Amino acid sequence: MNDFYTDERIVMTLDAGGTNFAFSAIKNGQQITDSIVFPSFATDKEKCLKTIIEGFKRVKDTISPLIPSAISFAFPGPADYKNGIIGDLPNFPSFRGGIALGPMLEHIFQIPTFINNDGDLFTYGEAVAGFLPFINKKLKEKNINKSYSNLIGITLGTGFGAGVVVNTQICQGDNSAAGELWLTQNYFSPNIIAEESVSIRAIQRVYKRDSASNEILDPEDIYLIAKGEKHGNKEAALKAFEEMGTALGGALVNTISLVDAPVVIGGGIAGAAEFIIPKILEHLNGNIADNNGNKYKRVIPEIFYLDNPESYNNFIKNTGVEVEVPFTDKKVIYNEQKKIPIGLSKLGTSEAIWLGAYYLALNNLDKKAFSEKIV
């Protein structure tokens, strides 16, 4: 497809929260309307659905006489995203039993509708317009014969969000249940989900535990305490973020071993990366042993943190060597050193999500047009 920054098609989108819905439209990779915000009415199914319809109608009226080509947005799961059906959501109790949200919107607006979760769309946005293009551009500038087309995305906030892109396509899985890292084993307590140590509540719990305080602080306050810019138990604050980093490293190590992909991190808590990332790197660049005491690298590739200048410079070093092609006079480049870059979002979490939704819609529209053409 064409460069989506020059694509004239318009996609209507929605930022769906448990409290408010924010509707807008995107063209040329840019939002072309101000956000239209309504309460979500999450406990009243009819009001909630009518609000979604009204929100998109307002957007359509706002951009008139231009005509939207698709609707695409993130919505919480569980869901059957491929068929646009939303399941039983904790934040939307009125949706219990399943809501055919995508088919409803397609019927009303007569345009294709694509729904996915925010972790997948965050990762997809960074894959097509953020982290992966940044990496590949830097490698090309150094004349390094290497490029990346896979990505693991992590969002750190109220919960532990994640998504996986494989060969520049979202990996949804056969049941719309891929990339659910929050459900993996907790590094500290294998019988507990990873999210209990990778979330806002995890930071609050560890700080409260180690500071012997009865007060539940906001993560931002704990961050300022860790930096020494606010009164409190600095050691406990540092421990809260470091423990999260170790737990996140424990979840990522198995994911990287399976997917062999770079990692991009977003979400509000990513602002405390200076305390979280070192523990992730310590875990990923560590060792693991077999029953005979033989040690192995925890993941096969070497991990590089791109927001650290020294690590970034080491990542973009050209370590490829020429090797001869047997029985010819030719030589080819052998990238013997395997590298995985990790870094913070290049777009910002919200922008990555709506750009991911936008690009996904255009990509799917192109596939549909191509399919119809060859038939």
Image: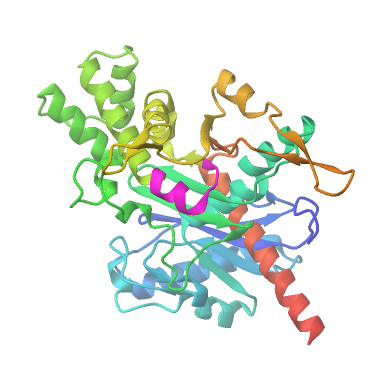
At a point 36% along the width and 57% down the height, the residue shown is 18
Question: Is 258 colored magenta in this rendering?
Answer: yes
Q: Quadrant of residue 363?
A: bottom right
Q: Is residue 135 left or right of residue 97?
A: right
> Residue at horizontal 43%, vertical 32%?
285
Indicate the quadrant where residue 232 lies: top left
Magenta part of the chain = 253-263
Q: At which x and y percent is residue 50?
A: 45, 73
Number of marks:
0
The image position of residue 55, as x and y in percent, is: 53, 64
Extreme-front residue of the structure: 327
Q: Residue at x 74, y 69 (%)?
A: 366
Query: Looking at the picture, how far across and down is residue 22, in whole percent?
Result: 50, 55
Outermost residue on the bottom side: it is 375
Q: Nearer the viewer, residue 188 or 116?
A: 188
Residue 245: x and y in percent read 34, 33
